[in-house]
Amino acid sequence: MNKPRSKTITRERLAQARVLVVGDAMLDRYWFGAVDRISPEAPVPVVRVNREEERLGGAANVALNVKTLGAQATLLTVVGDDEPAAKLRKLLAQHGVAALLGSDPQLYTIVKLRVIGRSQQLIRVDFESQPDHEVLAAMLGDYEAALPSHDAVLFSDYGKGGLEHIPRMIELARRAGKPVLVDPKGSDYSRYAGATVITPNRAELAQVIGAWGSERQLHERAHVLRKQHSLAALLLTRSEEGMSLFDDGDGDGNDSGGHVQVPAQAREVFDVTGAGDTVIATLATLLAAGLSLRDAMPLANRAGGIVVGKFGTASVSYDELFA
C-alpha cells in the first residue's frame, strides 16, 4: 500500500479551476427553537420557533462547496416554478454560484425542513414530488454547451429522478476529455460506466457488492466492480476508518489494481450532514486544478473531517483546508 501524498495548491491556481455540477438540487430549511415542555396532545416536544435559516442543499450544496474553496462552480439542474425555487436562485446568486436552472411547472422543488431544539435535530420533513418524466432531458443542449468551458464534471445523484440521462452525459464529458466524478445512488452502477471516479460510502457500496468479511474481499470486489464498469477509480468513504482509493495501481505492480488508504481525521463529530458533498466537491475542485486523484484524496479526507465539526450542510474554505 502506498503512503498517501498531500500537496498544497495556490489560491490563484484554484481560482482558475472550473467545475460543472449536475444533479438534484434542493433547499435546506432550518427552524431553531426552545423546547420547554411536552405536548399535551401527544408525547412529543413542543418547539417554540425563534429563528429560521435557509441553505443550499443537494447538488446546490456541492456547487457551493466548490465555490467556497475558491474555484468557479456552475450548477446545472431543474427546479419547479415555486417559492423554494426562487429562494434557491437567490441563494445561488448571493454565493456567486453560476446557475443553469431549468424550470418545470410539474416539479416541486425539493425542500428538507429540519426542526432543531436543544442543539439537536428533532425531526426532518421532506417536501418533494417524484417526476413522471425526465426532468433534465431539455437541458442536454445546455450541458453540452457548458462542457468546453469547464475542467471537471461532477454528478451529484440523490436518486430524485434528475439524472436519468447520466450515461449520455458521462459519454459526452469523457469525449471532451473532462474528468467525471459521481456521487452514486442505488444498486445499478452500470449507469456510471466510464466515469473517472465514483465515491460511495460503506452502506452504498455494500448494496452493490454485498457485505465484505475482510479487507482482502473488499479489495477484490471493488476492483472487479471498477473493471466491470470501466471506472478509472473507486473512492470508498468509510467514516471512522477513513477512505480507500482503488485505482489502476500507478506503478504498484499489482495486476488487480492499486489501493491507497488514509485514516480518518481525529475530530469531534457534530453533524455528518453534507460531508459526502464536501468530499466529492473537494476532489472535483482539485482535479480541475490539475492534481491527481492520489494527491487530491488526503485533502478531500481532511475537508470531510473539518465539515463534520460544523452544524448542518456546510462547506470548507481554502484557509481551513490548508491551515
Image (cartoon, helix red, strand yellow):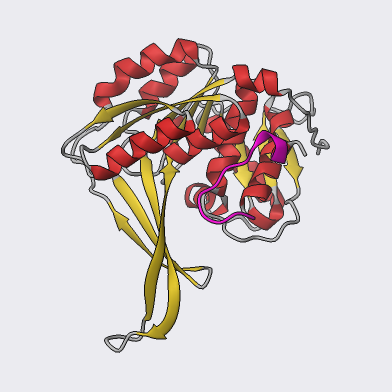
The relative height of residue 21 versus residue 132 in the rendered view (above or below) is above
Give the x, y percent position of residue 12.
68, 18
Residue 54 among magenta residues: no
Quarter of the image with the C terminus is top right
Foreground of the two, 147 or 2: 147
Give the x, y percent position of residue 322.
75, 36
x 71%, y 48%: residue = 216
Q: Which of the 4 image quarters holds residue 90?
A: top left
x 71%, y 36%: residue = 319
Does residue 143 appear to the left or right of 249 in the view shown? left
Q: Residue furthest front?
A: 50
Does residue 80 appear to the left or right of 282 in the view shown? left
The relative height of residue 179 versus residue 262 in the rendered view (above or below) is above
Q: Please give the range of residues in magenta.
A: 309-320
Q: Residue furthest bottom?
A: 40
Q: What secondary structure do most residues of the magenta stretch adopt?
A: loop
Give the x, y percent position of residue 21.
45, 29
Foreground of the two, 23 or 189: 23
x 24%, y 32%: residue = 134
Give the x, y percent position of residue 233.
61, 31
Does residue 292 appear to the left or right of 118 in the view shown? right
x 38%, y 68%: residue = 49
- From this viewpoint, is residue 290 visible? no
Does residue 275 appear to the left or right of 167 in the view shown? right
Quarter of the image with the N terminus is top right
